[in-house]
């Protein structure tokens, strides 16, 4: 793992991952850090800010990918969050959605909970992703270009080591009704 | 005379009549026949989840896009998923249909099911609308009616299916 001071921020990693796509994918973010940093990275109607239990973004993204098979979907999960729904990787590997990817942002702490270290802080997430999706389908964000990403078969996983933020992201500032209505409009276009 | 359809076949036909975009679940013996029919259906995908809480997430992802989605789990599975049900289904007002096999009924007295049923009554009924049915005698229009109710109410609906004394085999 790189020196923490050399790592990108979570917001920068999200921006970089979204930039790998030729057109804006649907982005489904876990509650807390991922939702806050996705919004801070630039609000878009195609952002789905999940208010559910930590880790559910991968499952929500799978459902969205299944009903929008011609759209790309990117689930954004933290290491603490994904560890709470690790079985979703098995489900996604079994369902084989050809339009779903996961961005795993690994800051090794529960950022919204006083930055308590996660139990997965020493876990090799690249190896975990490769166990479920295969070696060619799980890559580090730092190794990817848009051209290379376009050729990666889905489902796929991107692992991004990120620096713990000094504070929480700005508040979301949207009610559930606002999130639902705006996303529904984008998903129906 | 044509042989009467099993409860599992009738449930599948009612699901298909509602034209869902997605069905997801975790198996229970009472749902096995319906799940196999859903997996074979060319009309919608069936997503087999490893854990029940995922099913709620999967269905809510489809519902956020405005599509009909159905969850099929056992009562213990829904109990595992109440956080997701509350913070996604209820919070966003998503009209998903959750079919729950409510094990531990008078006609279904496995010792390991009794507390599941009591926990279902104590934990689920106060927070969500539950409609109860005899798994062996399901109305043909059950699932279309459930969607109509959920879409009007703008919230999830739970259909609790149980074995009843004197009823035919559910599956």
Image (cartoon, coloured by chain):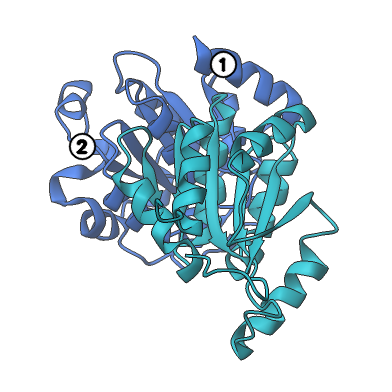
Please name the color used to draw chain A. Answer: blue
Query: What x and y, as percent, mark residue A71?
Result: 35, 21
Q: Give the mark nearest the N terminus, 1 or 2.
A: 1
Relative to B166, residue A155 above or below: above
Q: Circle 1: is it few (<14), some (14-19), or many (20+) Cα within 10 Å?
A: some
Compared across the picture, whether A19 is left or right of B155 comes to left
The numbered mark at residue A175 is none
Q: Which residue lies furthest to the top in this view?
A: A189
Taking depth in this image into account, of A165 and B29 the one nearest to the observer is B29
Question: Residue shown at 27%/40% (left/top)?
Answer: A155
Query: What x and y, as percent, mark residue B22?
Result: 45, 37
Q: Is mark 2 on a helix, strand or loop?
A: helix
Question: Residue shown at 59%/19% (left/top)?
Answer: A184
Is residue A58 in sight in this rendering?
A: no
Total tally of numbered discs in the picture = 2
Please name the color used to draw chain B. Answer: cyan
Compared across the picture, whether B18 is left or right of A126 comes to right
Relative to A23, residue B42 above or below: below
Label 1 resides on the chain identified as A
Question: Residue shown at 62%/90% (left/top)?
Answer: B111
The residue beneath circle 1 is A45
Compared across the picture, whether B115 is left or right of B69 comes to right
The numbered mark at residue A143 is 2
């Amino acid at each position: 793992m790189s020196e923490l001071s050399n790592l990108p921020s979570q917001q920068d990693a999200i921006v970089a991952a979204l930039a790998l796509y030729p057109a804006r994918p649907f982005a489904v973010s876990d509650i807390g850090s991922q939702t806050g940093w996705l919004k801070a990275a630039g609000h878009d109607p195609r952002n789905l800010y999940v208010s559910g239990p930590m880790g559910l973004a991968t499952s929500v993204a799978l459902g969205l990918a299944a009903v929008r098979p011609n759209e790309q979907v990117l689930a954004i999960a933290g290491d603490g969050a994904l560890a709470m729904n690790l079985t979703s990787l098995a489900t996604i590997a079994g369902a084989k959605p050809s339009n779903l990817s996961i961005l795993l942002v690994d800051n090794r702490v529960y950022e919204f909970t006083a930055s308590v270290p996660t139990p997965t802080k020493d876990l090799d997430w690249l190896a975990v992703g490769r166990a479920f999706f295969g070696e060619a389908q799980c890559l580090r964000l730092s190794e990817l270009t848009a051209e290379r990403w376009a050729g990666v078969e889905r489902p796929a996983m991107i692992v991004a080591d990120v620096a713990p933020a000094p504070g929480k992201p700005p508040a979301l500032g949207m009610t559930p009704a606002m999130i639902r209505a705006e996303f529904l409009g984008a998903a129906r276009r | 005379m044509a042989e009467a359809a099993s409860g599992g076949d009738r449930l599948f036909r009612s699901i298909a009549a509602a034209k869902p975009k997605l069905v997801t679940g975790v198996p229970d013996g009472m749902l096995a026949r319906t799940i196999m029919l859903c997996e074979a259906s060319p009309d919608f995908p069936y997503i087999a989840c490893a854990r029940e809480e995922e099913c709620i997430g999967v269905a809510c992802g489809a519902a956020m896009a405005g599509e009909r989605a159905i969850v099929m789990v056992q009562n213990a599975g829904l109990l595992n998923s109440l956080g997701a049900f509350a913070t996604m289904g209820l919070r966003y007002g998503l009209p998903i249909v959750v079919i729950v096999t409510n094990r531990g009924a008078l006609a279904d007295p496995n010792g390991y099911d009794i507390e599941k049923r009591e926990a279902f009554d104590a934990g689920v009924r106060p927070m969500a609308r539950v409609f109860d049915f005899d798994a062996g005698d399901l109305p043909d229009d059950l699932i279309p009616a459930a969607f109509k109710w959920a879409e009007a109410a703008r919230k999830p609906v739970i259909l609790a299916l149980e074995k009843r004394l004197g009823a035919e085999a559910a599956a």
